Image (cartoon, coloured by chain):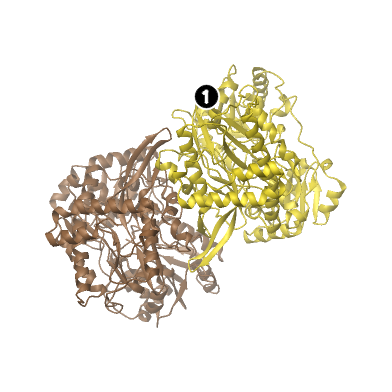
Chain colours: A brown, B yellow
Amino acid sequence: MTPIGDLTQIPREISGISEKKCYICRQKPMTNKMSGYDSPIGKRLELLREELRREHLSAFIFPSTDPHQSEYTAGHWKGREWISGFDGSAGIAVVTQTSAALWTDSRYFIQAEEQLKGTEFRLMKERVAGTPSIVEWLGRELVDADDKEVGIDGMVASVAEVEVLKEDLKRRGGITVRTNFDPLQRIWKERPSIPQNPVVIQPVELAGEDTQSKLARIRQALRKQHADGMLVAALDDIAWTLNLRGSDVHCNPVFVSYLLIASDKATLFINKQKLTDEVRAYLKQYAVDIADYAEVGKGLRDYFEYNILLDPSEVSYTLYQQVTRNIVRGTSPIPAMKGIKNEREQLGFRSAMLHDGIAMVRFLKWLDEQIKAGEPQTEISVSEKEALRAEQPLYKGLSFDTIAGYEAHGAIVHYESTPETDIPLQAKGLLLLDSGAQYQDGTTDITRTIALGPLTEEQKRVYTLVLKGHIQLQLLRFPEGTRGTQLDAIARTDMWREGYNYLHGTGHGVGSYLNVHEGPHQIRMDWNPAPLKAGMTVTDEPGIYLEGRFGVRIENTLLVVPDQETEYGKFLRFETLTLCPIDKRPILSEMLTAEERRWLDEYHEMVFQQLSPYLDEAEKNWLREATLPL
Amino acid sequence: MTPIGDLTQIPREISGISEKKCYICRQKPMTNKMSGYDSPIGKRLELLREELRREHLSAFIFPSTDPHQSEYTAGHWKGREWISGFDGSAGIAVVTQTSAALWTDSRYFIQAEEQLKGTEFRLMKERVAGTPSIVEWLGRELVDADDKEVGIDGMVASVAEVEVLKEDLKRRGGITVRTNFDPLQRIWKERPSIPQNPVVIQPVELAGEDTQSKLARIRQALRKQHADGMLVAALDDIAWTLNLRGSDVHCNPVFVSYLLIASDKATLFINKQKLTDEVRAYLKQYAVDIADYAEVGKGLRDYFEYNILLDPSEVSYTLYQQVTRNIVRGTSPIPAMKGIKNEREQLGFRSAMLHDGIAMVRFLKWLDEQIKAGEPQTEISVSEKEALRAEQPLYKGLSFDTIAGYEAHGAIVHYESTPETDIPLQAKGLLLLDSGAQYQDGTTDITRTIALGPLTEEQKRVYTLVLKGHIQLQLLRFPEGTRGTQLDAIARTDMWREGYNYLHGTGHGVGSYLNVHEGPHQIRMDWNPAPLKAGMTVTDEPGIYLEGRFGVRIENTLLVVPDQETEYGKFLRFETLTLCPIDKRPILSEMLTAEERRWLDEYHEMVFQQLSPYLDEAEKNWLREATLPL
């Protein structure tokens, strides 16, 4: 799945408070479609301002995340979307008594402009010269305000964010911040309720490690950080720790809850109706008590150990204030554990990739035939054909909304086809298809750029440059301790020479039947201190996007595995998990080195050997052709 | 010059306080030989302990730097060397009433073991499992001490270091830190005085920008950081700002001083006898007052503006305490300015490189002839032949002590031949030669590894891998904003595939007739947020070292220059400044790509074209042969 987001060197926090983008890649997310708006934006602003006046607040800030600092949230927490009408994944709305503005980044300028049209909201283009930060803007807007107090719901803003906001606003004429008030509770009448979907057990045969062992490892890590317990707010960390899965967030098999880990027991704060008797019994055996989701504040107040670890970027400001014991501010140890897949999880990934590959081959063959036969297909119609995945065993759903961008749409990195933008596919040019699924044994994420017919020389050249970068990364061997930041340029070297670049990361971790974006590692230009370790999954997805013309991205999911050990230490390399041919038709093979050609031929042979036993004769013939050496 | 130092991912501050290594590359430095010891170590410790008893201190810490946080210091500040006898560049000595220990890193284990032999000092091997940090060790050693107070001279320790030390020792049984006492003043009878060498003006024709303009730019940068002034402690930053040079530190053309910049004037704190009337008049025209070096504390106390910027990693703890106005803690703006060479400085570099190349060619030809003729040469004798550089115009001295390591010695990255270690060169194997000079128009730094006769296949293979990395970096083109951390792996990719690596950085900035190690940028595995910018110099020096056998390093100094501008932004590339053939005899040319071969042939042709007009017929013939296409 596309890791997009601005990779330039400009400081990230231009808006004064950080936006909640993907923490892996600040990134194109799948939209989690809300039901239609229940009243016009103007009316909503009126209601909000009435509330603000009553509460003596001169402004309110609406970030785009939830109490768990999720990248993707359930509808209940789409308050910024409700108040502004802008439904991009990244954006912060700020409303005063007399003005309203929405900050978003370049990926969303066009969309935001359209969606804000006719409203009071002024679009604030982040990282564009002259755009004020939220704090600067508030400083100016509130210069004559009676109440120099700004509200933000401390439940949906992290400790780290609110602390910076408070500090910065204080310097702007002594503006204070109030965090214990959520106007949406009163004015958002048709606010979706907090999801109540059932929780299911992820069998240990698939998880590879039981909850007892995971809790023991977490507690050991906490002791190393001199902490007796911790509050886990991140939904995927809770799901991983407890080997439970849910369906509260579109495409993310997580469930809304908190996990308070103490030294000898733990408490899961969750709406109890989500739990079957089986799950209750299951949790009991690991000394995991159950309490109501709304009781988490009380749970923190009642927490009895000497101290507690809280990750300031994970825990909400409001909950942080509830703690009465000593707080150890530190990084949660869970992402680093979850990121390394155990043997059983690796096996699961291989199985999921096999099934995903079979579905992809059937899809690609079908697409070829449709285009050749001149059947009327569009971006949306081919996206729907991805339903071929649903035929595969252990299929649970998509891991993100499919990106199918034909020609110029392929250059919009966060493109999602809608009935308004959908266009018919023709027997020429490039279709960029980025898709993936949740299988119970693994999560997949693959991008292929497909030639639907004749291509321009430029398209072939750009395609081959992207392919070279993609292959160069997979050819790498590197010492233990290497961070993704050090490797990112390997995928870019060839395109840089010709003046191309892409402003998103090259790779992100992929969950094991969990979120398609996972940390703690990543391969991108920005610094990330988490080294790549054996057992980690990571995508390899360079791209080139020519605005208004076409886009190319090629993505496999890789597994980090041990390589040789020499007097210079232990080395690692990548093993390719994704099993699907890479379209050879656009390749200018003279641009590939012998090594790159060899890699492609060997990869294709491996794909054929692994997938062909599961294919019928016609499919096998198609795949044979698609995987023949260059 | 070798950028060595530990590049592994282990946190740097294992000893509790950071050692003062090269801030560019934590790195092998040139030793700045002290006069012989004036009393045995045992006697010195006795004197020290007497002082400590009288002052009720239970231990004293001796770091390895000076009040200016210099990488290389004058003899006056070699207190750690005096108290312990260990003269490596990196090390911290700690002495209690009953014990003494010295922390250093792997580069110095053998040397330290030898130099500490027969003393009380126990060698503490940094980053080796089981080695306590200084703070841990002190916690244990002082568990029963009456006076739980540790001393460190706050003049030679930075604010950042002392703050961490205080915090960490407090947690170890409440040990406190005293910083206002330097026992060396009483017990080091033959302590060298602070250098009194004269200061000279670096002509603006060579500096390319006058001091008025530099001060204006610094003040502008300070205003951006909301500061009215700053204290400059870094000696090379002072030399750059004032266009003055000195000779107080071996190989570094700097002079001991402080520069206090206020909004409309500045004060240079310096021993006045170092200044001629000419320099005084010169400084006066830029409103730079002169005060005695020892008056800097008073200068800070008397500083009259609203606030002052102090860089906590540059300014000593003691001076920081003198400030009575508001302190803005921030990064000094000067290294970022100094790092970008203006046009005149670039021209100067080209001239210096031309002269350095002429000297190098004469040297290499002479060496070839000596070896062929069977003349008795050794590591030291060929190092001395580097005097050929002294014949060149504007030559001022070496930029660091030459590293000449034959065969197994070449694998010791920080090797410096002494009469005890010197070995004769034979007509076989590899000689690693890393050398450079100070010319008034530029500083040079070059490494060549030279085949003295037949080589093993392994030597050729390793040499070619290093050469490939060296070339790959120079072939790069990259977008503006790229940091060295992102590019470092490019020089390692090929050797990584074969299980080789080097544990030092790939490149550092080089001063303009200033220190051979300069920031703010670098090319290395560790994160450094300073992007590479057009006008910066940077070395390209990958290596492979096979312990006990041989070492290979190939180093050119490069200039970052603008490349193309595309819709993806502005790109940069490297231009090679160093003009000297790279020995072709060890190359296994089938291991090079066509592009690498082309680079080498073109580089060699350029070297020939530029140098040959200045060579006599015999030299020209030698160079023609050495630069013929592969």
* Secondary structure at numbered mark 1: helix
Q: Relative to the observer, which residue lies in front, B66 or B72?
A: B72
Q: Relative to the observer, which residue lies in front, A144 or A543?
A: A543
Q: Position of residue A277 (x, y in %)?
A: 13, 51
Query: Is B391 on the left-hand or right-hand side of B404?
Result: right
User: Can you say whether A393 is above or below A150 in the image?
Assistant: above
Badge 1 density bin: few <14, some 14–19, many ≥20, Cα 10 Å: some
Instruction: Give the residue drawn at x 29%, y 53%.
Output: A601
Q: Residue furthest right?
A: B277
Q: Name the quadrant containing residue A570.
A: top left
Q: Name the quadrant containing residue B145.
A: top right
Task: Tell me if residue B138 can be seen.
Answer: yes
Badge 1: chain ID: B
Q: How many marks?
A: 1
Task: Tell me if residue A197 can be seen.
Answer: no
Q: Residue furthest top?
A: B118
Q: Position of residue A376 (x, y in %)?
A: 21, 78
Q: Position of residue A565 (x, y in %)?
A: 37, 35
Name the quarter where the N terminus of chain A is drawn. bottom left
Instruction: Give the residue drawn at x 63%, y 44%.
Output: B623
